[in-house]
Image (cartoon, grey):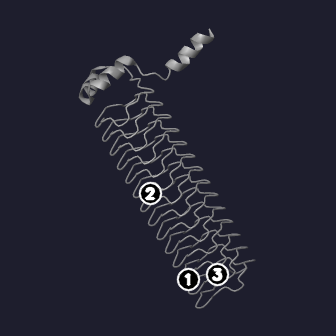
Amino acid sequence: MAGLTLFVEEAEFMADSNHLAVLTQSVEAWNAWRQHSEDTPDLSGIDFSGRDLRNVDLHHADLSDANLKGAHLGNANLESAILIGSCLNGANLQRANLRQAFLSEAQLQGADLEDATLQDAILSEAQLQRADLRRANLSFAVLDLADLTEANLSEADLTAARLTEATLHRANLILAILVGADLTHAHFEQGNLRWANLSSIRGKGASFQSANLNLAILKDAVLDGANFWHSILSFTDLQEASLLGANLSGCKLVGSDLRKANLTAADLQDADLAGANLEKASLHQAQLEGANLDGANLRQADLTETTLERAHLTATTLVLLRP
């Protein structure tokens, strides 16, 4: 019985020989077969590295543990395909349809996913270092613990995506859309998020250390305990954002909109808030030692128990709340 059990376990990762034979013929033959076949393709464990599979129809196919390194899968239909643990390093997936695909623990290092559709895809713990995801649709995708170090996500749509504890060191997110995304404990150190839309994100404990968020939108964002040490947030929209206990020391917040923001117990030491709008913001117990508040608007801001030693307050508007 032990031998039989071993045989079954190995067979789970072996491609169906009939399916493999059809795909080996040509993409055209494969697509024609798929139009008339009701079989769910089993191509698990195949080695098609470097193959030209442009326009191939692999929807719902089982490609778990497949080797597709350097394969050309441009315009391929991989909707709901199972690619768990597969190797797609350096693969060309431009404009591919990966909607609802299962890519947990997949290797996609340096893969080209420009304009690809990954809506509702599962990419937990996927390796996406240096991947090209420009204009990719990742809305509602799950990227928990995924590694996107130095990935290019400019103009990508990550609406309501889940990026809990994901790594995005030095990632390019210029003009990316992350509205309503879950960024809890995610890492964006040295990332470029200029003009990105992060409205209503959940980012408790996230790290944006030394990141560029110039002109980004973070309205209604929840960023309690987040680390923005020495990041650039000039002319950023932070209206009604929750930054309870956040580290904003050394940040550039010139001209930023912080109206009604919750900065209770936040660390703003040596931050540059020149010309910032902090009207009705809560700065209760905030640390503003050495901060530059020249020309800032603090009208009706809560400054109870706020530390302002060495702060610059030239031409600052200070109309305090009545007790």
Residues under labels 1 and 2: Cα distance? 28 Å
Q: How many marks?
A: 3
The image shows residue 203 at horizontal and vertical percentages of 59, 57
Residue ID at (70%, 82%): 308
The image shows residue 103 at horizontal and vertical percentages of 48, 38
Is 294 rendered above or below residue 40? below
* Visible residue check, residue 34: no
In the rendered structure, which disc, 2 or 3, sits on the residue that comes first in sequence?
2
Is 243 rendered above or below residue 94? below
The residue nearer to you, when weighing 237 against 153, is 153
In the rendered structure, which disc, 3 or 1, sits on the residue that comes first in sequence?
1
Residue located beneath label 3 in the image = 291
Residue located beneath label 2 in the image = 177
Label 1, residues with CA under 10 Å away: few <14, some 14-19, many ≥20? many
Residues under labels 3 and 1: Cα distance? 9 Å
- Of badges 2 and 3, nearer the viewer stands 3
In the rendered structure, which disc, 1 or 2, sits on the residue that comes first in sequence?
2
Q: Which mark is residue 274?
A: 1
Residue ID at (35%, 37%): 50
**Quadrant position of the N terminus in the picture:** top right
Residue ID at (49%, 74%): 235
User: In the image, is 213 to the left or to the right of 228?
Assistant: left
Residues under labels 2 and 3: Cα distance? 31 Å
The residue nearer to you, when weighing 182 against 7, is 7
Q: Which residue type carries mark 2?
A: Ile
User: In the image, is 122 to the left or to the right of 301?
Assistant: left
